[in-house]
Image: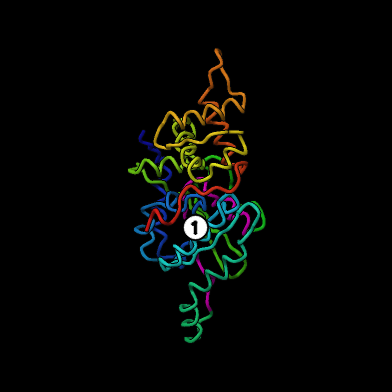
Amino acid sequence: MTIQWFPGHMTRARRQIEDKLKLIDVAIELLDARIPMSSRNPMVDDILKGKPRLVLLNKSDLADPAITADWVKYFTDQGLKALPIDANTGTGVKEILPLCKELMSAKIETQIRKGINPRAIRGLIVGIPNVGKSTLINQLAGRKIANTGDKPGVTKGQQWIKFGTDMDLLDTPGILWPKFDDQNVGMKLAATGAIKEEILHLDDIAFHTIRYMAEYYGERLQERYGIKELPADNENPNEVIEVMEAIGRKRGAIVSGGRVDLEKTSLLFLRELRSGKLGRVSLEVPEEYL
């Protein structure tokens, strides 16, 4: 399956970002802590053209904390500042402005030496759809400014938002590349809800995710769904389907003849995964990208 999703407003958003880059001091790149690299737009380095950057690992409350710590080290080793946050509760959000000031410290010190009163730092928030940009904006502002939603593509305009006298932020719609060359990337984005469900085969997404969890978080599946035996061979699709069917029976997703409704099972499973009912789960690790 090839996933394609590139609404027209995203094409315009890229052009708008490129037009405003000359006004920007710092880029704030918002990633999903569960899938940092898969949720990272591969065009972002080209778009931002070397601007100082702060990487925020959002939804860290849903991600495996040990693996998130590994991701922070990974980005630090790449020469980037990285910070786990939870935009919903505000965890880590207060550290954003000090880190942006740190990124701009050399420029600010130069301005002070020249007798120039430093202006507010101008920041640009970039992220794929449904990664939490609007929620972060509202959290920073302490009030609702940006629209939020649980479906990708909800923020469609661009606006400057002032945070006191220290920082102005430009909120931008997320930019998602037009075609996923790596099937696994598309699957992980779909599993976490970054892609609209209407265009997906849910059973494919659930199959891929259950196979991964059976290998790395097998005890979670056993505890939540009462699964007695995990696949002895994760590459054997029949064994993974047996786990899916066990989940379906546990959730009562049965159709005529006693068969398991795999599509309904997939939807129920993915909803539980996304809401954290399966615990804190990360779907990729830095070692895959070294």
Badge 1: how crowded within 10 Å, few (<14), some, or many (20+)? many
For disc 1, the marked residue is 125
Q: Quadrant of residue 77?
A: bottom left
- Quarter holding the C terminus is bottom left
Residue 122 counted in the magenta span: yes
Determine whether, in the image, residue 239 is placed left or right of residue 252.
left
Highlighted magenta segment, given as a residue range: 118-140
Please say if 259 is above or below 133.
above
Q: Which residue is painted at 55% across and 52% down in the image? A: 64
Q: Secondary structure at mark 1?
A: strand
Q: Which sits in the foreground, 76 or 107?
A: 76
- Quarter holding the N terminus is top left
Q: Which sits in the foreground, 74 or 112?
A: 74
The structure's colour scheme is: rainbow
Amino acid type indicated by mark 1: Ile
Determine whether, in the image, residue 184 is placed left or right of residue 96.
left
Please say if 66 is above or below 109.
above
Please identify the residue farthest to the left as the structure is shown.
Answer: 181
Please say if 54 is above or below 227.
below
Q: Which sits in the foreground, 241 or 10?
A: 241
x, y percentage for residue 275? 61, 42
Q: Which residue is painted at 52% across and 69% down in the image? A: 100
